[in-house]
Image: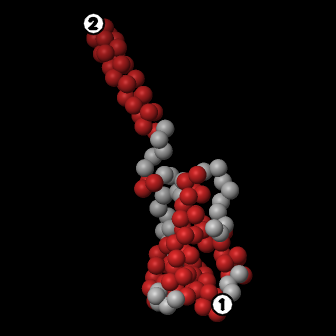
Amino acid sequence: WGPVPTAHDATDRKQQMYVNMIVSEWQMSFETKALGEPRLRAISNEMFQGAVGRLYWESARKVRLATSETRRARRFHQLLDEEYKKAPFVPTKPPSAGAAGRPRRWVWPLLAGLATALAAAVPTVRAMATRCRR
């Protein structure tokens, strides 16, 4: 499966495993010549501009480079490493912010509770304001 984080965050672990799966598919396609070098450079550069892709390569890089068994596999990993070094890091959301940048599940009950407390407090504040005016 490749290196995956041992962090407690299941989302980070799933993201790293997914990226590993994608990179493995790219490698198979590259080795069978279904994926050309220019396209590999383009898609890997795009991946390395985000935090998830960069984190993956930072943890998998040494193992993947050291265990390439064929000349084509070595070339594949060399290309990825070159694109990793060239890609500008474009911060988006932190890897653990949840799918599609949505807040964690606990945020919605918190917001609902705050809205309820605010709705309950409005009549009290109005009554106090009315008394102060008299």
Q: Is residue 7 placed above or below 71 in the rendered structure?
A: above
* Residue 106 point in image, percent of width and height: 49, 38
Residue 67, picture quadrant: bottom right
Residue at image mark 2: 134
Q: Residue furthest bottom?
A: 71
Q: Tell me: 74 left or right of 15.
A: right
Task: Locate the N terminus and report the quarter of the image it occupies.
Answer: bottom right
Q: Residue at 46% across / 75% down in the picture?
A: 46
* Residue 96 point in image, percent of width and height: 54, 53
Q: Is residue 127 placed above or below 62 in the rendered structure?
A: above
Q: Which residue type carries mark 2?
A: Arg
Task: Locate the C terminus and report the quarter of the image it occupies.
Answer: top left
Look at discs 2 and 1 and give the one toward the viewer.
1
Residue at image mark 1: 70
The answer to whether one can see residue 103 in this image is yes
Q: Residue at 60% across / 57% down in the picture?
A: 13
Spatial separation of the CA atoms under disc 2 and disc 1: 88 Å
* Residue 57 point in image, percent of width and height: 61, 72
Viewer-closest of 83 and 90: 83
Q: Tell me: 62 left or right of 85.
A: right
